[in-house]
Amino acid sequence: MDWSRQVSIKNSAEIAIMREAGRINATVLATVRELLQPGVSTLELDAAAESVLRKHGAVSPFKGYGHPPFPNSITVSINDELVHGIPSPKRKLKEGDIVSIDCGTFFEGYVADSAISAGVGEISPKAADLLQVTEQALHIGIAQMRSGNKTGDISAAIQKFVESHGYHVTREYTGHGVGRQMHEGPQVPNYGTPGTGILLRPGMVIALEPMVLVGTHKTKVLGDKWTVASADRSLTAHFEHSVAVTEGDPLILTVL
Ligand code: MG
Ligand code: MG
């Protein structure tokens, strides 16, 4: 993937545009979440997402991204699939699945990036626990996004919390700065050491994204060259928000 590692500091006007992009992104995810029912194809979810983006004058930065070019506007990853699942008319949701939807919004020159995981119908207590721990890990990471902290403080807080629940964090895929580019610096892994890494400053925007696996931290890329699944096929979950560092509390951009 083509990762630009430069850290950019956004001014308040840029943050305001990114907040609008984030609101659109949250609208897409809320719309898709309503559609999570048995029998719905993952391509139908993509079509719904694309129509919300279009209605708001936005497009997905995912479409055409990478090599081979990603074909759709959202990624849909089910159960053992951790991230980057390709929507398909043949892939239908089933009762008890847990589905991760990752969405990007490109709006007025800026990107917002966020993801949710949710169940289809009734899910197992184990799956529900995984979802809860992963979402909580995201908010524990966000709480570390204060001016003067370092990226390692975020990474370490996420890892410690996830591992205290007996789960694992991925090593190969990370959080990242976001702005004019979908992937900017700094890179923010879901594991690390407190007090290390890049100093956080007001105006930095980071897409923080705990990716959590039940069995081991190991992943593999499937034959479609995009879908990343747990190596042992155990359940996985993923939550993400784009968040700005401010003079005070972290500002979550990808909410309604
Ligand atoms: Mg994302
Ligand atoms: Mg991301």
Image (cartoon, rainbow, N blue to C red):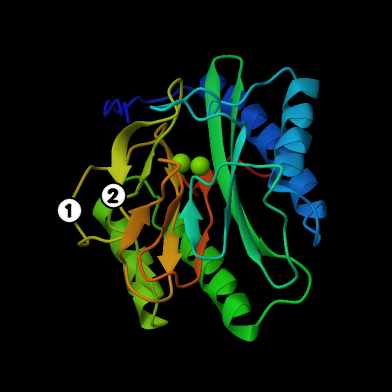
Q: Which residue is mark 1?
A: 196
Q: Is residue 151 left or right of residue 158?
A: left
State whether residue 247 appears in this view.
no
Of 123 and 250, the residue lying toward us: 123
Residue 151's mark?
2
Separation of disc 2 and disc 1 at Cα? 7 Å
Give the vertical position of 61 relative to 32 (above or below).
above
Q: Is residue 16 left or right of residue 68?
A: right
Can you tell which quarter of the image residue 178 is in? top left
* Amino acid of disc 1: Thr
Mark 2 surroundings: few (<14), some (14-19) or many (≥20) residues within 10 A: many
The percent coordinates of residue 36 (x first, y second) are: 77, 56
Can you tell which quarter of the image residue 130 is in? bottom right
Q: Residue at x 80, y 62 (%)?
A: 38
Image quadrant where one finds the N terminus: top left
N-terminal label among 2 and 1 = 2
Can you tell which quarter of the image residue 107 is in? top right
The local secondary structure at tag 2 comes to: helix
Mark 1 surroundings: few (<14), some (14-19) or many (≥20) residues within 10 A: some
